[in-house]
Image (cartoon, helix red, strand yellow):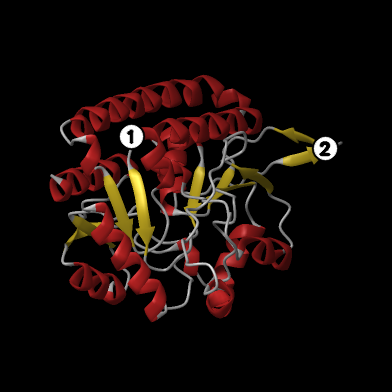
């Protein structure tokens, strides 16, 4: 989404960010764009690089994206390896935009380590290489915990206030109102999850993206099919799928969770092997208008409803 651009820019004087009337802001992902939109409102000219419904893990920037980044004053990113393509885009574009890692100050979690029988690990090590994954890789999906999304909002707000101090009061007002909604979202999720017995709060997904959600709401991540925090990972080996199916049977999981916009064939095969159902699609990014995930708040509410209903 792009608001009408006002031809003003930020100037860096002695390394200090000098104010402009309406900063040209670029957000990398749809979730991030939604946070920025709620805080910046009409006082920013916002462009989101990855389109609604797109997947930042596998995003392939086009020439117009380089131009957008080149012309930006502020570039908001999630960080933690979520936008693997961004460094190259930034350097290739010749951009002078101030990069802001919105996950700054957040304690990251590591992805769940895949459990493999000793002695077999070396045989399967090439498979991990194909995944471009090392055990202990940081999980970048921080927004699945609304309290962390609030910290991201604070980072966004402080940056916008420096960039455009004339609108500081408005940014604060917008941020306060939006953060209050996210606090209420957190309360609602806790209430919904409370109806689910602790023993049934177990998650199996295609890729590892619900770690922060699980930590916040006391779920166990049993496993994921791709064995990675990114959807870039190669198709899982038969051994990986068998291991996950075994873990599902051992844990008593009632359902596994597909992801909107992704091939979930391997997930369906594992579910069939383990004798469990595949729940309706979850969303790990904000989707197009009219979908159940057309905003961050709606996405989280949809995901929670699906998870609780499937695991009851």
User: Which quadrant of the figure has residue 86?
Assistant: bottom right
Residue 285 can be seen, yes or no: no
Callout 2 environment at 10 Å: few (<14), some (14 to 19), or many (20+)?
Answer: few
**Residue 118 can be seen, yes or no:** yes
Circle on res. 39: none
x and y percentages locating residue 218 in the rendered image? 34, 35
* Left or right side of 238 for 40: right
Residue 59 or 282: which is nearer the viewer? Answer: 282
Q: Nearer the viewer, residue 78 or 176?
A: 78
For disc 2, the marked residue is: 15
Give the image location of residue 113, x and y in percent. 50, 56
Taking 109 as reference, is 9 left or right? right
Q: Dividing the image into 4 quarters, which one contains the C terminus?
A: top left
Q: How many marks?
A: 2
Q: Position of residue 131 (x, y in %)?
A: 53, 72
Measured in 3D between alpha carbons, the distance from the residue under mark 1 to the one under mark 2, in whole angstroms, is: 42 Å
Task: Please tell me which residue is depicted at 59% across the width and 50% down the height of the picture.
Answer: 79
Q: Residue at x 46, y 49 (%)?
A: 141
Q: Position of residue 161 (x, y in %)?
A: 60, 27
Q: Are marks 1 and 2 in contact (CB under 8 Å)?
A: no
Residue indicated by mark 1: 217
**Badge 1 local density, few (<14 within 10 Å), some, or many (20+)?**
some
Q: Nearer the viewer, mark 1 or mark 2?
A: 1
Q: Nearer the viewer, residue 16 or 226?
A: 226
> 47 left or right of 240?
right
Instruction: State the residue lying farthest toward the front.
Output: 119
122 in relation to 106, above or below: below
First reached walking from the N terminus: tag 1 or tag 2: 2
Q: Describe residue 43's horizontal placement relative to residue 274 as left or right.
A: right
Task: Provide the secondary structure element on which disc 2 rests.
Answer: loop
Which SS class for mark 1?
A: helix
| 274 in relation to 253, above or below | below
């Amino acid at each position: 989404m792009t608001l009408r651009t006002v031809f003003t820019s930020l100037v860096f004087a002695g390394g200090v960010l000098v104010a402009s009337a309406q900063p040209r802001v670029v957000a990398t992902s749809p979730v991030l764009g939604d946070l920025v939109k709620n805080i910046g409102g009409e006082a920013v000219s916002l462009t989101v690089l990855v389109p609604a419904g797109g997947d930042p893990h596998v995003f392939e920037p086009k020439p117009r994206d380089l131009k957008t980044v080149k012309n930006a004053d502020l570039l908001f990113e999630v960080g933690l390896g979520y936008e693997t393509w961004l460094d190259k885009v930034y350097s290739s574009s010749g951009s002078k935009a101030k990069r802001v890692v919105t996950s700054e100050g957040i304690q990251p979690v590591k992805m769940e380590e895949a459990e493999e029988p000793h002695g077999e690990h070396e045989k399967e090590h090439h498979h991990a290489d194909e995944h471009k994954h090392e055990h202990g890789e940081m999980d970048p999906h921080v927004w699945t915990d609304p309290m962390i999304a609030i910290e991201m909002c604070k980072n966004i707000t402080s940056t916008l206030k420096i960039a455009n101090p004339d609108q500081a009061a408005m940014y604060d007002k917008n941020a306060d109102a939006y953060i209050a909604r996210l606090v209420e979202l957190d309360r609602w999720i806790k209430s919904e999850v409370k109806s689910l017995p602790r023993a049934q709060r177990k998650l199996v997904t295609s890729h590892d993206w619900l770690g922060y959600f699980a930590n916040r709401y006391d779920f166990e991540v049993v496993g994921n099919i791709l064995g990675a925090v990114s959807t870039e990972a190669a198709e899982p080996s038969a051994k990986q799928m068998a291991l996950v199916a075994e873990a599902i049977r051992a844990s008593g999981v009632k359902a596994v969770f597909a992801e909107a916009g992704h091939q979930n064939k391997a997930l369906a095969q594992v579910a069939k092997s383990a004798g469990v159902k595949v729940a309706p699609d979850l969303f790990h990014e904000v989707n197009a208008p009219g979908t159940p995930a057309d905003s961050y708040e709606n996405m989280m509410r949809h995901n929670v409803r699906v998870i609780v209903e499937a695991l009851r």
